Image: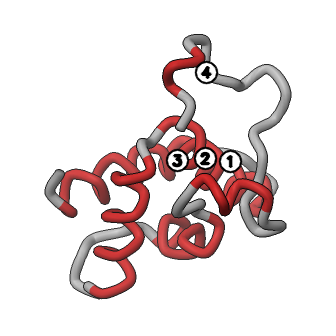
């Protein structure tokens, strides 16, 4: 997928999360959504693209969330990878990575 498309998708999620009054909750919510619903290949491509290209129009919250994005299944237990709040798990188990 094109990096611009991935950044656009992350920016849309960011716009929703930025409506939260708690900045930490917004940051963790953005990362949790990407971790839960994006394929690991998408996450890797997204993080690599945004990390290496300052010209991509990623919102500030998107850039701050990069360290919280899990890049592989092994990263699931890292302390920086937030878990989604209860009740926000994907309905279809096939959507998990």
Is residue 5 rendered to the left or right of residue 65? left
Label 4 with label 3: CB-CB less than 8 Å: no
- Is residue 16 positioned above or below 4 on the image? above
Disc with the residue nearer the chain's start (2 vs 1): 2
The image's mark for residue 85 is none
Dot 1 alpha-carbon crowd within 10 angstroms: few under 14, some 14 to 19, many 20 or more: many
Disc with the residue nearer the chain's start (4 vs 1): 1
**Comparing labels 2 and 1, the label whose residue is closer to the camera:** 1
Question: Residue most toward the front?
Answer: 74
User: In the rendering, at what x and y percent does residue 48 appear?
Assistant: 35, 76
Q: What element carries label 3?
A: helix
**Comparing labels 3 and 2, the label whose residue is closer to the camera:** 3
Q: Is mark 4 on a helix, strand or loop?
A: loop
Q: Is mark 2 on a helix, strand or loop?
A: helix
Q: Residue at x 60, y 51 (%)?
A: 30
**Comparing labels 4 and 2, the label whose residue is closer to the camera:** 4
Disc with the residue nearer the chain's start (4 vs 2): 2
User: In the rendering, at what x and y percent does residue 62 appear?
Assistant: 49, 65
Label 2 with label 1: CB-CB less than 8 Å: yes
Identify the residue position indicated by label 3 in the image: 34
Dot 3 alpha-carbon crowd within 10 angstroms: few under 14, some 14 to 19, many 20 or more: many
**Comparing labels 4 and 1, the label whose residue is closer to the camera:** 4
Identify the residue position indicated by label 2 in the image: 17
Disc with the residue nearer the chain's start (3 vs 2): 2
Q: Which residue is drawn at 33% across and 46% down?
A: 9
Disc with the residue nearer the chain's start (4 vs 3): 3
Identify the residue position indicated by label 4 in the image: 90
C-alpha separation, residue under disc 2 versus residue under disc 1: 7 Å
Name the foreground residue: 72 vs 89: 72
Identify the residue position indicated by label 1 in the image: 29
User: In the rendering, at what x and y percent does residue 15 appear?
Assistant: 48, 48
Is residue 69 rendered to the left or right of residue 74? left
């Amino acid at each position: 997928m094109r990096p611009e498309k991935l950044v656009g998708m992350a920016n849309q999620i960011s716009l929703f999360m930025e409506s939260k009054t708690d900045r930490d909750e917004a940051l963790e919510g953005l990362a949790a959504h990407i971790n839960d619903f994006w394929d690991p290949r998408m996450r890797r491509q997204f993080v690599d693209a945004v990390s290496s290209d300052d010209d991509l129009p990623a919102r500030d919250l998107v850039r701050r969330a990069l360290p919280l994005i899990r890049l592989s299944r092994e990263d699931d237990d890292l302390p920086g990878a937030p878990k989604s709040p209860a009740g926000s798990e994907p309905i279809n188990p096939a959507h998990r990575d």
